[in-house]
Amino acid sequence: MNENLLGIIAGVLTSISMIPQLVKVVREKNVEDISLLMLLILISGLSLWVWYGFVKDELPIIVSNSFAVLVNINLLICYMVYNKK
Amino acid sequence: MNENLLGIIAGVLTSISMIPQLVKVVREKNVEDISLLMLLILISGLSLWVWYGFVKDELPIIVSNSFAVLVNINLLICYMVYNKK
């Protein structure tokens, strides 16, 4: 299989799987199950993957991890807005 | 920065961020917030990333996505065991 196509399919699947959590948090306005520390670690890690993608010049890695960073920054914003503590 | 080191750090961070969900599910024996469909899509996507890593011969991608597959297969097993419906 073409390796870029493989990466794109992999990226689409792992991206799709992140959407429901964002939808759930936005709909229920409840972030008590989200750990701020873990969210920050995840965003840092995903950002490094984007960097890695640029270093290796691999579009599937850049696109899918950028998407994941965006989803998780949205979760972070939700956390700030909805967290009551 | 050495690109493999970059990939390893990125992989460690995104891997660490997955552990708390597994710990939470195992501890609380509660999987009602987990979607089976999304878990299957995620495991499929992560497995394709492992495949992509082999095609591209990139160890950081192979290792971090294999770890993610293992964590999510554990979540899948928890889902089977704890799901009451």
Image (cartoon, coloured by chain):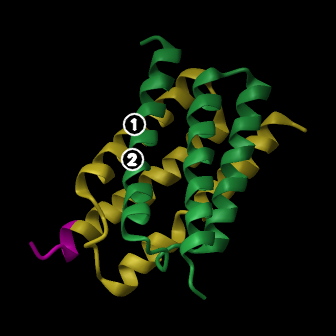
Chain colours: A yellow, B green
Label 1 sits on residue: B13
Answer whether residue A27 is magenta in the image. Answer: no
Q: Tell me: B33 left or right of B48.
A: left
Q: Chain of mark 2?
A: B
Q: Quadrant of the C terminus of chain A?
A: bottom left
Label 2 sits on residue: B17
Rendering coords of residue B28 (x, y %): 37, 70
Rendering coords of residue B43 (x, y %): 67, 55
Circle 2 — which element? loop
Answer whether residue A81 is magenta in the image. Answer: yes
**Residue projecting furthest to the right:** A1
Work out whether B10 lies above or below A65: above
For image coordinates 57% across by 74% down, the residue present is B35
**Of residues A81 and A85, the one drawn nearer to the viewer in this rendering:** A85
Q: Chain of mark 1?
A: B
Q: Which residues are magenta?
A: A80-85
Residue B51: quarter of image: top right
Rendering coords of residue B72 (x, y %): 58, 54
Rendering coords of residue B42 (x, y %): 64, 58
Q: Quadrant of the N terminus of chain A?
A: top right
Asked if both marks, 1 and 2, belong to the same chain, the answer given is yes
Circle 1 — which element? helix
Residue B25: quarter of image: bottom left
Task: Tell me whether circle 1 and circle 2 mark residues in contact (CB < 8 Å).
Answer: yes
